[in-house]
Image (spheres, coloured by chain):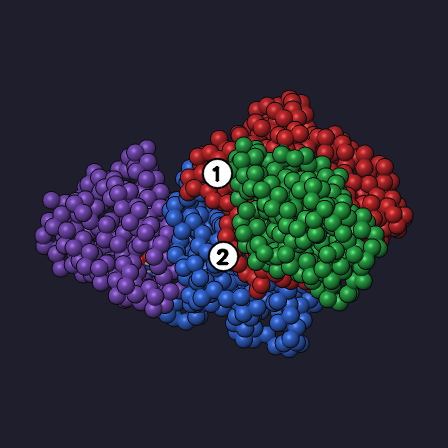
Chain colours: A blue, B red, C purple, D green
Amino acid sequence: MKKIINDPATVVAEALHGLAVAHPERLRVTTDPAVIVRTDAPVAGKVAVISGGGSGHEPLHGGFVGSGMLDAACPGAVFTSPTPDQVQAAVTATDAGAGALLLVKNYTGDVLNFETAAELAEATGTPVRSVLIDDDVAVADSTFTAGRRGVGGTLLLEKIVGAAAERGTDLDGCARLAASVVAGVRSMGVALTAPTVPHVGEPSFTLGADEMEIGIGIHGEPGRARVPLEDADRLVARLVDAIVSDLPFVAGDRVILFTNSMGGTPLLELYLAHGIAERLLAERGIEVARRLVGPYVTSLEMQGMSLTLLRADDQLLDLWDAPVCTPALRWGM
Amino acid sequence: MKKIINDPATVVAEALHGLAVAHPERLRVTTDPAVIVRTDAPVAGKVAVISGGGSGHEPLHGGFVGSGMLDAACPGAVFTSPTPDQVQAAVTATDAGAGALLLVKNYTGDVLNFETAAELAEATGTPVRSVLIDDDVAVADSTFTAGRRGVGGTLLLEKIVGAAAERGTDLDGCARLAASVVAGVRSMGVALTAPTVPHVGEPSFTLGADEMEIGIGIHGEPGRARVPLEDADRLVARLVDAIVSDLPFVAGDRVILFTNSMGGTPLLELYLAHGIAERLLAERGIEVARRLVGPYVTSLEMQGMSLTLLRADDQLLDLWDAPVCTPALRWGM
Amino acid sequence: MACTTEDVVAALRRCAEVISEHRDELVELDREIGDADHGENLNRGFAAVVSAVDSTMPETPGAALKLAATTLISKVGGAAGPLYGTAFLRAATTVGDAAELDAPMVAKVLRAAMDGVVARGKAEQGDKTMVDALHPAVLAAESATEVPVGELLKAAATAASEGAAATVPLVARKGRASYLGERSAGHLDPGARSTELLLGAFAGGQR
Amino acid sequence: MACTTEDVVAALRRCAEVISEHRDELVELDREIGDADHGENLNRGFAAVVSAVDSTMPETPGAALKLAATTLISKVGGAAGPLYGTAFLRAATTVGDAAELDAPMVAKVLRAAMDGVVARGKAEQGDKTMVDALHPAVLAAESATEVPVGELLKAAATAASEGAAATVPLVARKGRASYLGERSAGHLDPGARSTELLLGAFAGGQR
Ligand SMILES: Nc1ncnc2c1ncn2[C@@H]1O[C@H](COP(=O)(O)OP(=O)(O)O)[C@@H](O)[C@H]1O
Ligand SMILES: Nc1ncnc2c1ncn2[C@@H]1O[C@H](COP(=O)(O)OP(=O)(O)O)[C@@H](O)[C@H]1O
Ligand SMILES: [Mg+2]
Ligand SMILES: [Mg+2]
Ligand SMILES: [Mg+2]
Ligand SMILES: [Mg+2]
């Protein structure tokens, strides 16, 4: 295993320390339980927007803490959902009386831990609402699975709900908005290589030199199918087809297109893929109104990419455009 | 070779297309010769700040085109310096009568091609100045080498000079400022793995499973020494020691610290390394006044990192803080 | 031969030992059909349980089980954290402040633990989860309430072991392994295996 | 037997062929002590030179050389682009508008080309660059001005070949290979090798 670390057991704690010293003006980090909180929290009168999940997906979620997006993030161990006390501590640190909205990626561990935390927080009198995001079309949404996973759409959800909360939308309004984003967002990813979790020391799965995994999860969970490597045109078409036909997105739709690197895929390739995605959407009459390209929802050093599409009306676009000031996403301020 | 591409021969052209459609409001891309230009160029009365170099280092340079930073960037083939006509076309597209400043990384190819372009541009009547950046302390600066390479410091140079030009500093002033940045900036990097250039198809060099290359260049050029893998504390100390003792940086200095991923090193590790660097600098009495952490000056998917330190007075910090609006670096607007 | 506070604490220590010994195996099982953290998470959690009992010295079996529950909930994360946490919490509630646990009580405790897991995780038998090890263990315990607690626990552990082994051919329908669909068949479920190990540790740490 | 426009154009086509055949070898040489692009860059450049002469049909040897020069400068990039571009440019200037080149002129052209490379790149003999192949080639040409142009070019190519081979033990002091210091010894310089190939192509394309 080749990594710039000291000890697998302390990777997350040391990285959190680095995050804190890197962004002293925007966030502070508490340890035990580990929580990343915007410096000005609690913000009077504002709904607290909180997310979290396993570490190893950076900048998700800690990189999105700040004005206009998350009030706090709860980083678990690498690829492991955080514990209820982390979530509780996040609620306590950000609660300004307007309640807290928990944005939870749909994985059994995340769901159970956030659920437990929500019960505990409600018991202390803070109104808490949870919204599950399950945008990954690679997984069949049936009783034979744990349901669709939350992947790239999480970023769009955090940005848009964060903007609404910043503008003073109340807890119910934020929860309704979040549900509408979840209803209109779909993603799918592909992996060319496997990530290596520090405490494991070897790749999470084995892919042949000429293979790729279509429909990969962001923890290196296997996806829909293992297929021979193919060129970018074909590969991007696969993702676009699966996503578009799922919702479905139709001619005339306006969308936000998010082209995401899983970490190890360089920008050169990512922009190339983005260009293809834009062309394929244009061919279907789908209008890309906004776009984001970069490594934002990653799986350590895994090579691969994902596409996320969100059907967006004027309100969503306006919230997307609203000022945001976080370590990883910043505009308008 | 596992890459999201169609054909090695068209990677750069296709990626440039993707960049253009991803950022229509900020930049436009011309092909043949390939140039990335901010949409509002030429900006009346403003010195044009132009850089460029081989592709594969994204977001450098194209991701830094926009208000407050570069007016244009010239992307060469992967790891290959651009040609004089690209640079000439960039000058033509951005020349507003106040002249052009070329920021050139010190590699033989870049130096020769920019030099040729400068001669050609001067011949057409545009005043052109060139500044070489050679911040890589890994290379001995002697008559036995092509001199130090330009690496991470390039980003700081582009940001600071770009801000000055945006404020109306004239060509001489911009060139003097650039020289002062070059005089005060030092970098060094390390690689854990090798990048694979699309037209080559195999890794640029071979590192054993337990080896790392100290003092790596951003094209996978070998560095100072190949040594056994070591933990983050030791590795970061190596980089800090080499950089600090070179200028030297001394107690009481205020610096901008830039912790850079070479591409394949995930943010989790990068923040961890950043935390160590801040601690080591604090121990030496060097004050980190500003910091930047991320994959900004990369070498395709190479795992590794670099540190860059710039001694910064109030003027440089003020220019660093000035608004910037580019695909990869954005604040204040 | 009933089960005292010391027995429960000793059993918790054996759990930590067994999990630590099998950490890599559980990681590897989870790497095959999950995300390779099960062994690491449980190991972190049970190490914390040992620290907690070291510094707190619980006074009843129920207090020991509750301490284990809250520690697991706050240290493990993932799916297994809340599931095992709930199991220990329900066990503690069932025990109340009894000073010793006899065989019928232990059987009740195991059933309550399983019900807690099912209430949280909604898994049924055959979904290829820890429930597949827990369920036969509970049945075995319930038909061994006449024997000493040690015997009962051994019977439960043996049944858990068989239940775990029986997960190999199953297709997962809950948890992360369910994303694999048919590809999850042919692998031992890591949670079922850890349940087997934990019950083994309670039964005497022989396995 | 002097050298006509057709001869120069044919030689340029042979250059493109030889470089294309040796693309991978030049990439590999550059991978060892540089950045693995030399073969790719020259191949792109000479393919463009062929397109250029196809569409422009130069009317004098000088025009053909100038077309090659500007095409290489605008298509190759890297160190080799401006260096070879300058070499061809100086060659074109030296030729002027002569319709044919005799042996003394070819020797002068080669010297001018080398001077151009040295003026741009500031490399001296022994720095482990293309100059180490060019320099012996120029000397060989200058002592062969009495023989037909074809013979002169063969002598130059042979000398270039020896000069290139002699770069193997050298430690690089210019270009990207210089970063390697002592580690650059033991490798053939890619630029010296391409110079050898190009002069071989001019001499008849036999190698
Ligand atoms: N819904 C569920 N009900 C019961 N057990 C479950 C459920 N989901 C997962 N599990 C168990 O949890 C185990 C995985 O635990 P762990 O790896 O710690 O969590 P995660 O999947 O979050 O990484 C599985 O092997 C399975 O036995
Ligand atoms: N200063 C110089 N003078 C002469 N030749 C040089 C000089 N620097 C480099 N070269 C030649 O250029 C070759 C490398 O060319 P190429 O790989 O195309 O450029 P780059 O190093 O920019 O990638 C070297 O092998 C060497 O022969
Ligand atoms: Mg997990
Ligand atoms: Mg090069
Ligand atoms: Mg797991
Ligand atoms: Mg080269």
Name which residue type carries label 2: Met
Across and down, in percent, residue B216 comes to: 56, 39
Subunit ID for the residue under disc 2: B
Query: Does residue B317 lie above or below A114 as drawn?
Result: above
Ranked by sequence position, the earlier of labels 2 and 1 is 2
Q: Are the two marked residues, 2 and 1, in contact with CB atoms closer than 8 angstroms?
A: no
To the question of a shared chain for discs 2 and 1, the answer is yes
Cβ of mark 2 under 8 A from ligand 4: no
Q: Is residue A42 visible?
A: no
Query: Does residue D97 lie above or below D164 as drawn?
Result: below
Q: Quadrant of residue A9?
A: top left
Q: CA distance from mark 2 to mark 1?
A: 21 Å
The structure residue drawn at horizontal position 16% and vertical position 51%, both measured from the top left corner, is: C153
The structure residue drawn at horizontal position 25% and vertical position 41%, both measured from the top left corner, is: C17
Subunit ID for the residue under disc 1: B
The structure residue drawn at horizontal position 29% and vertical position 49%, both measured from the top left corner, is: C25
In front: B175, or B226?
A: B226
- Give the residue pinned by disc 2: B1
In front: A204, or D105?
A: D105
Q: Is residue D146 visible?
A: yes
Cβ of mark 1 under 8 A from ligand 6: no
Across and down, in percent, residue C159 comes to: 17, 58
Across and down, in percent, residue A232 comes to: 56, 65
Name the mark on residue B212. Answer: 1
Q: Residue furthest top?
A: B251
Secondary structure under badge 1? Answer: strand
In front: C176, or C27?
A: C27
Name which residue type carries label 1: Met
- Mark 1, Cα crowd under 10 Å, few <14 / some 14-19 / many 20+, is many
Q: Quadrant of residue B172?
A: top right
